[in-house]
Image (tube, rainbow, N blue to C red):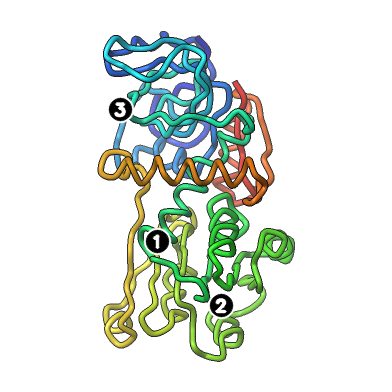
Amino acid sequence: MKAIVCRSFGGPEALTLSDHPMPVIKANEVLVRVRAAGVNFADLVMIAGNYQTKIEPPFVPGMEIAGEIAEVGSDVAGWQVGDRVVSLTEGGGYAEYVALRASHIFRLRPAISFEDAAGIFINYVTSYGALHWRAGLYRGETCLVLGGAGGVGLAAIVLAARAGARVIGAASSAERCELMSRYGAAETIDYAASSLRDRVAELTGKRGVDVIIDPVGGEQGGLSLRCVAWSGRIVTLGFPAGGVPSYPANILLVKNASALGMFFGSYLDHSPENVRSAIAEIQDGLAGGVLAKYRIEPYRLDQLPTLLERIRGRQFIGKAIVTI
């Protein structure tokens, strides 16, 4: 089969499209014919050898797929060949076929295309978990979304607005601010042109925001804690901006605030029922037009290294996928 292979830790230049052995499934697994795969900043972390779960080269990266079952393991019940599925994988997604634990696959609604499905799993379910499982967002609260024009950011804006929050989206250009407004942000902040802290104070009457969703890290992530209101919550999701933010404990103490982490992948093992429920709700919302589909840009599998370079350079808006 054709696959993208990482033969040594490094950047996108370490990836090659080549022939690779077909996966052999275990009794509790299914073989999935991959039709589309989501592209994420976490792929860059994985091929650099710095991801939470480290896979030694050579390996096939890719952690978000949509496709159909091609083979079912002997111990698997409730699934059959041809079933449409989405899944978060532990690598292996950038290939024609991938072997997955049956407990890690989720049924894909007929109304949702493989391309759209490959773009919703990580972004929408991660944002859903950050807002509801971790931050406990209430209707009427104010929610600040950093990196709001990226895949996770746009999903967080859509879901927070749908939950009845007043959403402030923050990004690094006027173009990104216009996009966030279209997806439900009541106000936007271009933090390349103004101070994040000053604009939040202006927009909230110096009260601050109740919830901050931070999928970017770096300098803005660290500064954002000073925007939080009394009893506010900040949820950190990753660090594509480079640095890992530090949250001074004295600010948390004085404001009775909480700094929370959200690693979505661990929920598959620790709380799969939450994941299953969230995926069903999100698919219903997308299929029924209640939730917005963000802009999907499909690429060929051989274009993946170039695409990851764009993501590394923060030159991408929306969500990228590769079709296989």
Occupied quadrant, residue 196:
bottom right
Residue 215: image tag: none
On screen, 295 above or below 186? above
- Does label 1 or label 2 sit earlier along the sequence? 2
**How far, Cα to Cα, is label 1 from label 2?**
17 Å
**Farthest residue in the bottom direction?**
205
Q: Which residue is mark 1?
A: 236
On screen, 295 above or below 84? below
Question: Residue, x 70% and y 65% (percent of image)?
Answer: 181
Q: Which residue is mark 2?
A: 196
| Screen quadrant of the C terminus | top right
Q: For this view, does 184 lie left or right of residue 142?
A: right
On screen, 230 above or below 102? below
**How far, Cα to Cα, is label 3 from label 1?**
27 Å
User: Residue 254 location, x and y as percent?
Assistant: 30, 88
Q: For this view, does 213 lie left or right of residue 76?
A: right
- Does label 2 or label 3 sit earlier along the sequence? 3
Residue 56: image tag: 3
User: Residue 251 location, x and y as percent?
Assistant: 33, 83
The answer, for residue 317, to whether it is visible in the render is no
- Does label 3 or label 1 sit earlier along the sequence? 3
The answer, for residue 128, to whether it is visible in the render is yes
Nearer the camera: disc 2 or disc 3: 2
Assign a secondary structure to mark 1.
strand
User: Do residues under tags 3 and 1 come within 8 Å of each other at their CB atoms?
Assistant: no
| Of the pair 39 and 245, the residue shown nearer to us | 39
Q: Residues within 10 Å of mark 2 (few under 14, many from 20)?
A: many
